[in-house]
Each structure stands twice: as C-alpha cells, then as structure tokens.
Image: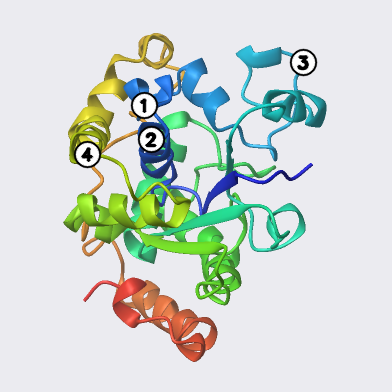
Amino acid sequence: LHREGDVWVVSYVKSGTTWTIGILAALWKHPAADYAGSLQKVTRNFCPQPELPDLGWGDDGFGHSIRELNDWSEGAPHQCFKSHWPSKDHVVSNGKSKFIYVMRNAQDQMISMWNQVYGMGFHYGTENMTFEGGWDGFVEDWMNGDVENGQYFDHVASWYSRKDDPDVLFVRFEDLKRDALDVILQISNFLGTEFLSPEHIQNVTELTSFEKMRQADEQDFGLRFMRWLGVIRRTHVRKGEVGSGKLMFSTKQLAALELEYEKKLKTLGVPRDWVLLD
C-alpha cells in the first residue's frame, strides 16, 4: 500500500544503494544513520526490500510480509523502501511515492558484483549456476541477464526513461564519489528537506562518508562472524572505486559492452561515460 512520503531507493545491484539509504537515514535523523554501511537490523528495518521473501523471522529477517511493511508505515511521517527492480510493477509512478534511482557505470558495477557473489560463495540469485567458468563465465552470464535482477542495460534503460519525471531523482555513484555533498543537497531538495541547517548537512556528510561506511561494515558483528566461519569471504562495502573495472575485460568483452550500449542506451541519450570507462 503506497503512502504519501514513501521514498524508494532503487538501483541495479551493487550500484550505491547502501550509500544512498545511509544518506536518507541521516537526512531524516533516523538511528540507522549511525550504522550506514552495515546490515544491522536497524538499517534493514529502516529501509526494507519488499521483493525479498518473508521467512517468518519478523523484524529479525531480511524479508517481510506485506502486512508487516504496512504496519511499520502506519503513522510514520515517511518510509524508505529498497528495491533492485526495473521500472515496472510496484515501482511505477503511483502519485504518492518518490523514487531515487542510483546508477553506476557497467564495468565497475560488474567488478563489484563479481566480488560480492564470489565473496558470498553463491551465484547471484539464480539457480543451477556455479563458479566453474570463473570471471569469464560470470561476464557471459551478466551480459545475458542470467544474474540477479536481469540485464544491466535493460534495467538502466527502464529507469532512464523516467529521469525527468518529477517523482524520480537520478543519482550516479560516480558523482557520490566525486562530490558527495552536492548529491546530498540534491537528495535533500528532492525530498523537501532543503532547509536543514549547515550543521545537519555536515553531520550527514560525515556519517555517510565511504570510509565511515566501510568501517561500519567491517565492525558488523554478524558479518564478522560469518567471515570467521568462512560463510562469506569478502566485505559488503569493499573499495567503491571509480575506474577499477578497466583492466579485467578482454577486447571481446569490451566490444560486447559497447554494442549493448549502442543498442539500448545511446538511443535514449545516456552519455557513454556514464556507462563505459575510457
């Protein structure tokens, strides 16, 4: 049930969702801001992801029933929701919600996603797939959309077509890295919180710095325990670098990326340097 004041933070996976949710929590002075970058219960419950299955764990789980989500929203001045969905179904314009779409260039996104799924030890939300093909096998699956949330270019295209809609704010991971304060102010204006004090804005910047988020992730007890057990092998918030994807791609893979950009995003006016690294 959509309500006035709902804000959806949407992205193709590993594009800056966690960072943007932390900014939202800090702008709203929610306790989750103190744990930006971690997967603590307070951060999961601040911005739940409706697409995840409800396993019956209540607010201790990652997935929740629609009834739980509606109960949490009852009486709240605003509610954050996380999504990795393309622009359809429950994330189409509804006259009440606002949507912040976070985009990251394809090569850095792919590197980050590979490190997460390899580090987690399972294959990105799909069935009957292994790591036998290594990096090259992953790239092929990614290009074909046989990964979590489907094909990157289709996903970006579905949201880019809405970038000028009044209920959508388009945010780039690269801009967050280059000038986080500017993006924070854009988000604040979009949400209607533009009259925040300079002290509050400075606090938002400090709470959601990449270094602070990485520290929160490394200190998350649950993640530390799973890493100690060997269940996961990498951190959730890793490097967050721009340009780290330049060296891992073969000439053939780069050509395939270029072709997909030409077919699906160039025609929409998406700048090439938003998608591909030079």
Q: Nearer the viewer, mark 4 or mark 3?
A: 4
For label 1, the crowd category at 10 Å Cα-Cα, with few meaning under 14, some 14 to 19 and many 20 or more, is many
Question: In the image, what residue occupies the spot 29% across and 53% down?
Answer: 185
Q: Is residue 126 left or right of residue 31?
A: right
Q: Label 1 near label 3: C-beta < 8 Å?
A: no
SS at mark 1 in the image: helix
Q: Nearer the viewer, mark 3 or mark 1?
A: 1
Mark closest to the chain's N terminus, 4 or 3: 3
Distance (Cα) linking label 4 and label 3: 36 Å
- Which residue is denoted by mark 2 in the rendering? 22
SS at mark 4 in the image: helix
Distance (Cα) linking label 1 and label 2: 5 Å
- Which residue is denoted by mark 4 in the rendering? 205
Say which amino acid is labelled 4.
Answer: Thr
| Disc number for residue 56 | 3
- Which residue is denoted by mark 1 in the rendering? 33
